[in-house]
Image: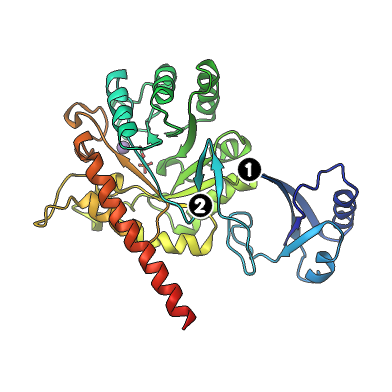
Amino acid sequence: MIVILEPNLTPASAEYQSVRQYLQSLPNITLREHQEHGAQQVLTEFYLIGDTAALSKETLENLPGVDRVVRISKEYRILGRHRDDHRPTAFEYNGVTFSQDTLTIFAGLCAVDNPTHVEQMLRALRDHGQVCTRMGAYKPRTNPYSFQGHGKSCLPYVFELAGKYAIKVIAMEVTHENHVLEIQQALQLTGNPTGVLLQIGTRNTQNFELLKAVGRQRQFPVLIKRGFGITLEESLNAAEYLASEGNARVIFGLRGMKTNLADPHRNFVDFAHVPVVKRLTRMPVCIDPSHSVGSRHSGPDHILEILQVTAQGVIAGANMILVDFHPHPNLALVDGPQALTLDELGYFIQDVQIARRAYEQRVALATAKRLI
Ligand code: PEP
Ligand code: MN
């Protein structure tokens, strides 16, 4: 059960204290407090864990200072979408809003290789009106002898160049909690010219100690990818780990499932789960067409399969697209074969816009049909 206080009630206020005291006095209930800092207001939520079946929703709702009470199912307590649950799905970070209603493109390098390529990428994004990108500095690789990413040494120039081209948010994978510290330090050193969306990669979806560490920090929002070989439920529980530690600014990423049945794609595209994740949780949903398809093949209609699956995700309501580009894919140190070129950026954006318009028309049609 969640008891949500009226906005902006501070811990110093009498109502806050008396609600907390009352909840603490309930038998067989453990209390967890969570504060949601929005752009305009601070929301306090008390999570009641334990024997809540006998509690009366009305009694709790009548306590002075309580705005409303939500009865939740066991799963995904914080990030889940529960019955009568009208908590917002949106959060803002560094001037960019993420929600289940928005769509944001994160096109960029799979891995940072050198300042020239970073700058070419960022300039192209700026020229196409984009304010977000992806840039990997820490790369988890299957082969220990493959390029592992430049790590913290590249962060200062990546952040400075991002600032130069007015990029607001960089999606960047971390594989160890020290990486979060290195990112914090590099941002501080360069005067916070940009923001970072911490990415948990598919190989770390169930690295619970990493999830707890990333969940404890509140500075950066988090993109968590679905684990490539586990159930959707297990991956959503992994996302809930982040929230249970205090960080509920979480985006859930679909990137395909590892199975031979995906051949000739790199992973089996799972974007049919976009609406499922939106139904079960309040997280914005990201799709990664590059790591799903893994190649630049196109059909007889000349449409690249990467663009085909992007459109499939967007027409189903995806909220974020993480997609690999490179100025010279043949020179890329990681995942060159799936990279789109800078010449294709404008075309990619246009194609996404077509699919987004189709999604919006479908929502309008479904809404109209419900009213009849
Ligand atoms: C990536 O986005 O760079 C990446 C490694 O993705 P995944 O964790 O989905 O393999
Ligand atoms: Mn990659």
Question: Could you tell me which residue is drawn at 48 percent across and 36 percent down?
Answer: 197
Instruction: Assess disc 2: are there few (<14), some (14-19) or many (≥20) residues with their C-alpha within 10 Å of its C-alpha.
Output: many
Apparent side of residue 94 relative to residue 125 in the rendered image (left or right): right
Residue 96 to residue 117: above or below: below
Which residue is tagged 1?
39
Image quadrant of residue 300? bottom left
Circle 2: residue type:
Ser
Image quadrant of residue 156? top left
Residue 63 to residue 181: above or below: below
Q: Secondary structure at mark 1?
A: loop
Instruction: Assess disc 1: are there few (<14), some (14-19) or many (≥20) residues with their C-alpha within 10 Å of its C-alpha.
Output: few
Figure colour scheme: rainbow
Where is residue 364 drawn, in percent x and y? 41, 69
Question: Could you tell me which residue is drawn at 29 percent across and 46 percent down?
Answer: 349
Q: For ligand 1, which image quadrant applies?
A: top left
Where is residue 24 drawn, in percent x and y? 86, 54
Question: Could you tell me which residue is drawn at 57 percent across and 51 percent down?
Answer: 240
Q: Are marks 2 and 1 in contact (CB under 8 Å)?
A: no
Which residue is tagged 2?
99
Q: Secondary structure at mark 2?
A: loop
Q: Is there any visible trace of residue 110 in the rendered image? A: no
Q: CA distance from mark 2 to mark 1?
A: 14 Å
Question: Could you tell me which residue is drawn at 86 percent across and 62 percent down?
Answer: 63
Could you say which is closer to the camera, residue 58 or residue 95?
A: 95
Numbered tag placed on residue 124 in the rendering: none
Apparent side of residue 333 relative to residue 365 in the rendered image (left or right): left
Q: Quadrant of the N terminus?
A: bottom right
Where is residue 288 drawn, in percent x and y? 34, 47
Circle 1: residue type:
Ala
Could you say which is closer to the camera, residue 167 or residue 200?
A: 167
* Circle nearer the N terminus (2, 1): 1
